[in-house]
Image (cartoon, rainbow, N blue to C red):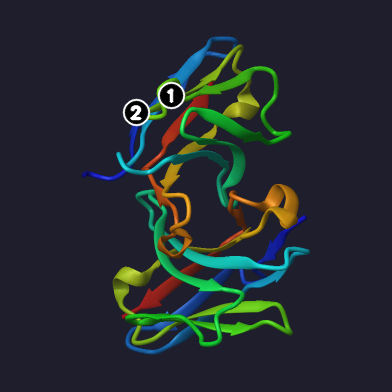
Amino acid sequence: AQKITQTQPGMFVQEKEAVTLDCTYDTSDPSYGLFWYKQPSSGEMIFLIYQGSYDQQNATEGRYSLNFQKARKSANLVISASQLGDSAMYFCAMRGLTLAGGTSYGKLTFGQGTILTVHP
Amino acid sequence: DTGVSQNPRHKITKRGQNVTFRCDPISEHNRLYWYRQTLGQGPEFLTYFQNEAQLEKSRLLSDRFSAERPKGSFSTLEIQRTEQGDSAMYLCASSLWGAVVYGYTFGSGTRLTVV
């Protein structure tokens, strides 16, 4: 079974500053992928960044980077130079990448989310 | 390609009625997923298809729920005898098997309100 935990219900950040959103996970899969999604008030889930458990380097995509610490089972999202448009709900998710992971293979399991508010 | 399309965007129905939602995935994506999201929570997996085959169903998917993807393209999710607890956002997503680094592309969802 897989579990994603996001312990920060809400976070506040000043515009142009960096913010870290926490995510810890638990899985028995030998190989897995970690994702972050953004959900603005419009409701659409927007894919931000992906990290494979086998990747040696932390993933980066523009202003987004993923601080992956495999031994601690954490995959925190770092947003640099926050913008007002970054205000949204953020979800961490994972899926198994091998059939050995059983039912976790193929489907995403999401955390509870963190609401980020960027202040001007 | 305009992404994943879901219809309708909103549905209000009376308890006990049947409802059907439609999802049109990205055309080259062979996997299609249905999720349910209640207010303030993360999406919960319901079911997914690879082409026309339904590969997995969640225990959340009671006998009142059924999903189809008859020709491996669009999919429908039907809820029979709706209950107030079915009120939620129903999200559809699609992906290309093997292209996990690109994530799953989600639609804007169908918000169901059962009164």
Residue type, label 2: Asn
* Residue designated by label 2: B7
> Is A75 in front, or is B16?
A75
Q: Residue at x 54, y 29 (%)?
A: B53
Q: Residue at x 59, y 50 (%)?
A: A106
Q: Up-down: is A84 above or below A88?
A: below
Q: Is residue A74 left or right of residue B70?
A: right
Furthest residue in direction left, as rendered: B1
For disc 1, the marked residue is B21
Choose between A1 and B53: the one closer to the eye. Answer: B53
Foreground residue among A34 and B64:
A34
As displayed, is residue B95 above or below residue A65? above
Q: Is residue A18 left or right of residue B43?
A: left
First reached walking from the N terminus: tag 2 or tag 1 = 2
The picture quadrant where one finds residue A82 is bottom left
Question: In x, y percent, where is residue A1?
Answer: 77, 55
Locate residue A88, reporting x and y percent.
42, 63
Determine contact: label 2, label 1, CB under 8 Å. Answer: yes
The subunit letter for the residue under badge 1 reads B
Q: Report the amino acid beneath label 1.
A: Phe
Q: Chain of mark 2?
A: B
State the CA–CA distance, disc 2 to disc 1. Answer: 6 Å
Q: Quadrant of residue B109?
A: top left
Secondary structure beneath dot 2 equals strand
Say which quarter of the image contains residue B1.
top left
Q: Is residue B60 above or below residue A95?
A: above
